[in-house]
Image: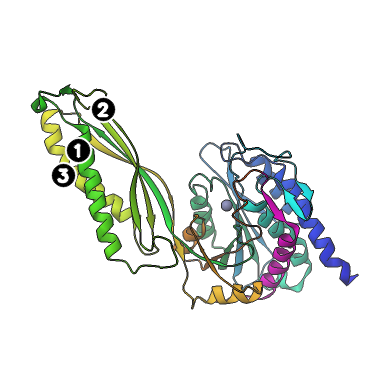
Amino acid sequence: MNASLPTQRLSNSVEMLRQLVSFNTISAESNLGLIEFSRDWLAAQGVKSRLIYDSTGKKANLFATVGEGAEPGVILSGHTDVVPVVGQPWSTDPFTLTEREGKLYGRGSADMKGFIACALNAVPGYLASPLAGERPFHLALSYDEEIGCFGVWGLIKDIQESGAKVSACIVGEPSSMQPIVAHKGTHRFRCCVRGKEAHSANTNQGVNAIHYASRLMSFLQARAEQIAAGETPDANYPVPTSTVSVTMIDGGTGANIIPLRCDFTVDVRTLPGTSFAALLDELKAYARTLEPEMKAVAADAGIDVQFIASIEGFGVTDADPLLAHVTRLAGSQRKIQVSFGTEAGIFQRAGIPTIVIGPGNIDQAHQPDEFVEIDQIAQCDAFLTRLLAEPFSN
Ligand SMILES: [Zn+2]
């Protein structure tokens, strides 16, 4: 009987993954099918969920506490949305989990419904164990991670306001079950400069939007160099400091016209400890110093700085107690730093000790024929069993 238990656990996790993959939760679509399925499945186990909706009511986060007791519990966290499949040459239907040679194919199988399947499937065993009366654990499922980590902010706010007792957070992004210890923050914004058109011979009658845009870009370039010079470089990244890059620009309509508009987009990658918000504030303050001379020529000229999206950076030190705990429980040999963003930095910023570890490989994420190896699901099941059995205290 005992020998058959792990096999049953694994087949249940695979079956759960089959269900989760069948919901088309591409970020542009509603995720409510998956969220309501999870809510109802948890309710059948006697676990109550809270749904935290977005402003349209078409997407929701889910938060659930499993078990009870005085001790704080770990959050198992995953995003429910997946990236699009359009234009990708899939061999099989991306929303039908398909097994071939020890691999489970389907959109989101690695990123990151495999982890969510294991996390949900950990519930029945936990509730049947004495642990469930000593301390709870928590499930946190978000929306809109892939398009800028928009959902998780409301989820974390809800967790904080609910007074849930939290010891740590595991973000189950695909990492081949090795702990991810750091990634840079990713931030994007757009600058829209509105000037005044004039014949290019009559510069005194116009406000040159491209000239003002170039001053803003020079300001950013100078600040980028100062920020990098003030940082402790991290040699584990190909570029060891924070970066600021203008990545798109659009402006001007004719070679002899003072341009009315110039818009440019900026991508910022920050090391932990470097504040994107501060950079944005500095840029806005600089823009305010330019506007009086623009408005002196044209009252409606000006500069608009529009925030697009932010994924907080994430990093833990070698001495981090949660890292030691997770490394031991995962039986892991190495720890990795990655260039992709996750929700981990947002949990960390909220004061919750966090590590990223999950089944599958990021190399398969976002690709056609995305897959997770069945053995990775089995490893994740075993890891979660150990994680939930051994309390972490900071
Ligand atoms: Zn992901």
Callout 3, which amino acid? Thr
Q: Which residue is mark 1?
A: 212
Does any atom of ligand 1 lie closer than 8 Å to the CB of label 1?
no
- Mark 2 and mark 1 lie on one chain; the one further toward the N terminus is 1
From where the camera sits, is residue 123 visible? no
Q: CA distance from mark 3 to mark 1?
A: 11 Å
**Residue 372 appears at what percent x and percent y?**
69, 54
Mark 1: amino acid: Tyr
Of badges 3 and 1, the one in the foreground is: 1
At label 2, the amino acid type is Gly
Few, some or many residues within 10 Å of mark 1 (<14, 14–19, 20+):
many
Mark 2, residue position: 252
Give me the C-alpha separation between circle 2 and circle 1. Answer: 13 Å
Q: Secondary structure at mark 2?
A: loop
* Residue 18 drawn at (x, y percent): 76, 48
Rendered view: 219 above or below 230: above
Overall secondary structure of the magenta stretch? helix
Q: Is residue 379 magenta?
A: yes
Nearer the observer, disc 2 or disc 1?
Answer: 2
Q: Residues within 10 Å of mark 2 (few under 14, many from 20)?
A: some
Q: Which mark is residue 263?
A: none
Q: In the rendered image, is residue 180 in sight?
A: yes
Magenta stretch, residue numbers? 369-392
Q: Image quadrant of residue 84? A: top right
